[in-house]
Image (cartoon, rainbow, N blue to C red):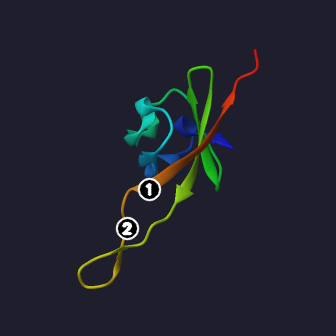
Amino acid sequence: MRRVAHDSSATAMSSVQLDGGPIELAGAVELTELDEVIFSEEKIKIRHGNGYEHYEFVRPQVLTPSGSEESERTTLRWVGRTKIAE
C-alpha cells in the first residue's frame, strides 16, 4: 500500500467518484487534495476523522451511442470504516 501523494500512478487516478460513506467524501473527489489516502489494487482507504473509510473499485461499462465502451471517471463504492487505535 502507498500514499497517494508520493505515487506517480496515483496522480493519473486523482479524480474519482465516491459512492456511499460520509457525506463529506461523497461525489467527485480529488484524491490529491486529501490528507491521507492509502491504496492497493483492490481498494483505497481515506483518513477521515478518527478512522479510515474503505472504498472498493467499481468498473461500470459505459456504452457510447455507437455501442463502443467509453472510459469515465473511476468510481469507488464505500464498504466500511475502521477506527484508528489510540
Task: Identify the residue shown where x is 64% and y is 55%.
Answer: 42
* Residue 72 percent location from the top left of the image: 36, 62
Residue at the farthest right position:
85
The answer to whether the residue labelled 1 contacts the one labelled 2, judged by CB atoms less than 8 Å apart, is: no
Q: How busy is the neighbourhood of tag 1: few (under 14 within 10 Å), some, or many (20 plus)?
A: some
* Residue 31 percent location from the top left of the image: 46, 39
When the figure is inspected, residue 38 is found, relative to residue 36, above or below; the finding is below
Q: CA distance from mark 1 to mark 2?
A: 9 Å
Q: Residue 74: which numbered mark, if any?
A: 1
When the figure is inspected, residue 60 is found, relative to residue 66, above or below; the finding is above
* Residue 14 percent location from the top left of the image: 43, 45
Judge by depth and name the residue closer to the eye, 35 or 55.
55
When the figure is inspected, residue 80 is found, relative to residue 60, above or below; the finding is above
Q: Is residue 69 left or right of residue 51?
A: left
Residue linked to disc 2: 71
Residue at the farthest left position:
65
